Image (spheres, helix red, strand yellow):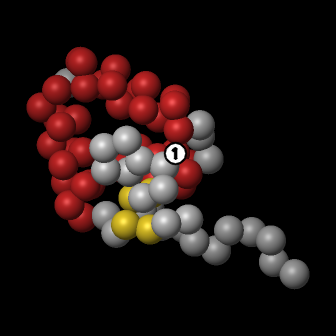
Amino acid sequence: MNNFKTQRGWYKDSLNKKISGVCSGLARRLDFPVWSTRLVTILLFISFPFAVALGYFIAHCCLEERAY
């Protein structure tokens, strides 16, 4: 019996979202806590606001929404 995760993509998490689910989907994909992914995103946004906002917006538009 295969117990490994067969889903390897990055999706927006619609059940655990604050804004659009990008950070929670990335945290689920990388097996990190959601709070740490959001904290890193906020810290990067303070340092590089245009790049992070642009990347977040592109991820918001391109990623599929999935309820895990």
Neighbour class for label 1 at 10 Å: few (<14), some, many (≥20)? some
Residue at 44% over, 68% down: 66
Residue at 33% over, 25% down: 42
Q: Give the residue type at disc 1.
A: Ala
Report how many numbered discs are placed on residues in the image. 1
Residue at 25% over, 26% down: 45
Q: Compared to 31, does 67 lie above or below?
A: below
Q: Identify residue for label 1.
A: 27
Give the image location of residue 58, x and y in percent.
19, 54
Give whichever of 7, 14 is nearer the camera.
14
Q: Can you name the residue that lies furthest to the right here?
A: 1
Element assignment for label 1: helix
Residue 17 visible: yes
Give the image location of residue 30, x and y in percent.
56, 48
- Residue 38 falls in which quadrant of the image? top left
Give the image location of residue 26, x and y in percent.
46, 49
Q: Can you name the residue that lies furthest to the left here?
A: 50
The quarter in which the N terminus is drawn is bottom right
Q: Compared to 56, does 44 lie above or below?
A: above
Q: Is residue 47 left or right of residue 40?
A: left
Residue 26 visible: no
Give whichever of 68, 28 is nearer the camera.
68
Q: Can you name the residue that lies furthest to the bottom here?
A: 1
The quarter in which the C terminus is drawn is bottom right
